[in-house]
């Protein structure tokens, strides 16, 4: 049976208690995008500034949410700052793959899910690996992916303007 | 004060009627069920009534000439009569079976609303409503250009009635909750209804949280329509009620079209059935309605006065316990006095997010709701994204409240190192 420590790793609690890149950026040059989790009421507002050469120059986060959504957003902000938009897309795909529920991981309750990341870009997730335990708590997956889905939407909007 | 009177319900004995409460476990722990405002657990007589129906009697209603069909129809219509008696309705014909309260509101907005409201007409709601009493009216506003006005919440979590007459001026409908699913607040429905009627407006009451917990009499409440749902009052999911004054229902056009709701169909038109069947298109939730009837019988045997007394005592104990043990660390969103509120206790705790609290509580077998409770406008008024909510029912006792408090201690230990 998965326990609380599977979900709330120390690094997650650290990002929750000391969130990185909290705040807002001037719009423009930054782009502002909002995300909602309609089930729980979590709200996230991202400010993302992309250079002409396609690099995420800066990112800030405001809004409110649980420790999982806040720490995921905090870790995401650290991970994407200074990366190119293409790199961020790869990272997002890798993260979402980690968050997808594999049947095998549900059957083997309490064990690590199989690494079935063949079609997923070979990206190091680093600290974000700490969120792997969230898949054992399916109702919380949306908390972890909220910031990422919102960022993907924001980058799409930036690209189309 | 309430603590000195003996409890009106023997919870230990009553819990034996609820197989889940005595038999189920969560993470290896006994279940402490504090989420009845979301959905209640079911007693054996309700489960048996539905099982017996399927095993001994079941056929479709209002169709079969054969004995099974006739018997099932009798049981289905008997459930309607039980529902009418339970809310003091003058006749079973005013009881329309719906899917849930949400459908009751949609029926009203679609049928009565489209027949009676046009551009500029006013519907008065409040800011503490459940989405079910907001979105159907917002949809009608977008479609018809009606005007929506809102009673607001006062500092003490009651409705601010200081502008009531002004808001009701020229209104066609007042639609309000009889008990907030977030705050537990019990708005003064009779006073609101009298004020609305004085200006010529009709009154719809969201009684989803009221009918399961307080003795209900639609004549005393003075409303014209009232909605409630089976699954929050020990019955199954899939069946709810819209009660309406018969002459109003009679004058309303049908909601959905199809079988059951017609008297005659020609290729060039149709004649609708009488109320209430006019609003029950297609095969209805037969076993569910019969299950609801059994739930009503169960609650009637215990007595709704006893249910209310028990819940007031337990709510008082819960408010006291949470304040004594957590002091400034806990913020309770709702009235202080148990006579002004039901057993729905929403709270913020130590800056922890409700999801995180609920996750720790889950590990200790404690079921509470964490979220916006389908009342996002109210969350904005309260200045929070979400709350944790413990809700009490007749099968809860002080040990459940103590288990909640103990589990909250664990949440604080876990997160606030």
Image (cartoon, helix red, strand yellow):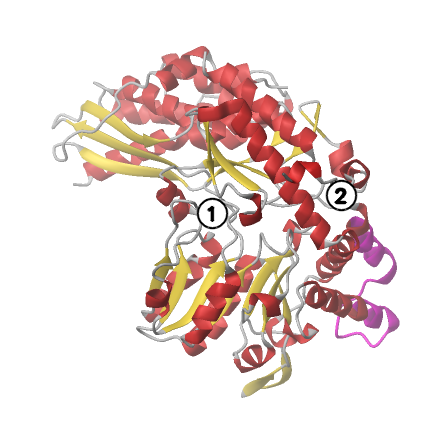
Position above or below: B161 against B413:
below
Q: Is residue A115 visible?
A: no
- On whether residue B70 falls in the magenta region, the answer is yes
Chain containing mark 2:
B
Q: Which mark is residue B39?
A: none
Q: Chain of mark 1?
A: B
- Image quadrant for the C terminus of chain B? top left
x, y percentage for residue B412?
A: 50, 19
As drawn, is B364 to the left or to the right of B17?
left
Q: Nearer the viewer, mark 2 or mark 1?
A: 2
Q: Quadrant of residue A155?
A: top left
Q: Quadrant of residue B263?
A: bottom right
Question: Tag 2: Cα neighbours inside 10 Å, few (<14), some, or many (≥20)?
Answer: some
Give the answer, above or below, for where B338 lies relative to B85: above
User: Dot 2 corresponds to which residue?
Assistant: B9
Q: Nearer the viewer, residue B379 or A4?
A: B379
The percent coordinates of residue B122 (x first, y second) are 35, 70
In percent of width and height, residue B274 lies at: 64, 81
The question of residue A137 being in magenta is answered with: no
Q: For the point 35% across and 26% down, which residue is it?
A: A92
Front-most of residues B370 and B168: B168
**Dominant secondary structure of the magenta stretch?**
helix
Residue located at (71% from left, 61% from top) = B289
For the magenta stretch, what is the residue range? B47-72
Q: Residues within 10 Å of mark 1 (few under 14, many from 20)?
A: some
Residue at 52% across, 78% down: B252
Rendering coords of residue B81 (x, y %): 73, 69
Q: Which mark is residue B374?
A: 1
Quarter of the view holding residue A32: top left
Image height check: is A151 above or below A121? below
Q: Secondary structure at mark 1?
A: loop
Does label 2 or label 1 sit earlier along the sequence?
Answer: 2
């Amino acid at each position: 049976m998965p326990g609380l420590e599977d979900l709330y790793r120390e690094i997650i609690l650290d990002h929750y208690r000391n969130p990185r890149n909290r705040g807002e950026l001037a719009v423009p040059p930054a782009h502002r995008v909002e995300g909602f989790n309609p089930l729980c009421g979590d709200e996230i507002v991202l400010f993302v500034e992309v250079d002409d050469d396609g690099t995420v120059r800066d990112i800030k986060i405001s809004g409110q949410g649980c420790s999982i959504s806040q720490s995921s957003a905090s870790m995401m902000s650290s991970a994407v700052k200074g990366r190119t938009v293409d790199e961020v897309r790869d990272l997002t795909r890798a993260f979402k793959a980690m968050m997808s529920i594999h049947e095998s991981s549900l059957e083997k309750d309490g064990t690590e899910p199989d690494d079935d990341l063949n079609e997923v870009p070979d990206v190091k997730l680093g600290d974000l690996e700490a969120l792997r335990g969230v898949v054992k708590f399916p109702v919380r997956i949306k908390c972890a992916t909220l910031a990422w889905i919102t960022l993907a939407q924001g980058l799409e909007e930036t690209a189309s303007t | 004060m309430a603590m000195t009177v003996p409890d009106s319900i023997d919870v230990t004995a009553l819990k034996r009627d609820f197989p889940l409460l005595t038999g189920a476990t969560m993470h290896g722990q006994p279940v402490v069920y504090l989420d009845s405002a979301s959905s209640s657990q079911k007693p054996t007589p309700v489960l048996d009534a539905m099982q017996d129906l399927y095993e001994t009697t079941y056929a479709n209603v209002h169709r079969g000439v054969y004995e099974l069909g006739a018997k099932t129809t009798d049981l289905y219509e008997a459930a309607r009569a039980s529902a009418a008696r339970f809310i003091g309705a003058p006749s079973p014909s005013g009881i329309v079976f719906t899917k849930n309260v949400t459908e009751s509101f949609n029926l009203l907005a679609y049928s009565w609303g489209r027949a009676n409201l046009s551009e500029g007409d006013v519907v008065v709601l409040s800011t503490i409503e459940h989405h079910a009493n907001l979105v159907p009216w917002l949809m009608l506003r977008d479609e018809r250009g009606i005007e929506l006005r809102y009673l607001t919440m006062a500092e003490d979590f009651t409705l601010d009635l200081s502008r009531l007459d002004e808001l009701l001026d020229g209104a066609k409908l007042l639609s309000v909750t009889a008990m907030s699913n977030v705050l537990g607040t019990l708005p003064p429905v009779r006073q609101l209804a009298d004020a609305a009627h004085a200006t010529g407006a009709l009154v719809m009451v969201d009684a989803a949280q009221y009918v399961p917990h307080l003795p209900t009499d639609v004549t005393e409440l003075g409303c014209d329509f009232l909605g409630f749902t089976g699954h929050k009052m020990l019955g199954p999911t899939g069946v709810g009620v819209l009660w309406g004054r018969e002459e109003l229902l009679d004058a309303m056009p049908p909601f959905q079209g199809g079988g059951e709701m017609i008297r005659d169909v020609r290729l060039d038109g149709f004649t609708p059935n009488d109320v209430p069947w006019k609003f029950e298109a297609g095969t209805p939730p037969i076993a569910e309605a019969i299950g609801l009837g059994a739930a009503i019988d169960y609650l009637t045997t215990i007595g709704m006065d006893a249910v209310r007394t028990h819940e007031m005592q337990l709510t008082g104990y819960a408010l006291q316990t949470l304040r004594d043990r957590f002091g400034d660390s806990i913020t309770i969103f709702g009235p202080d006095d148990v006579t002004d509120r039901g057993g729905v206790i929403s709270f913020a705790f130590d800056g922890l997010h409700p999801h995180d609290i609920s996750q720790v509580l889950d590990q200790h077998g404690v079921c509470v709701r964490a979220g916006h409770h389908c009342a996002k406008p109210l969350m904005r008024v309260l200045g929070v994204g979400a709350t944790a909510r413990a809700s009490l029912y007749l099968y809860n006792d002080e040990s459940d409240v103590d288990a909640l408090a103990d589990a909250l201690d664990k949440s604080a230990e876990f997160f606030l190192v």
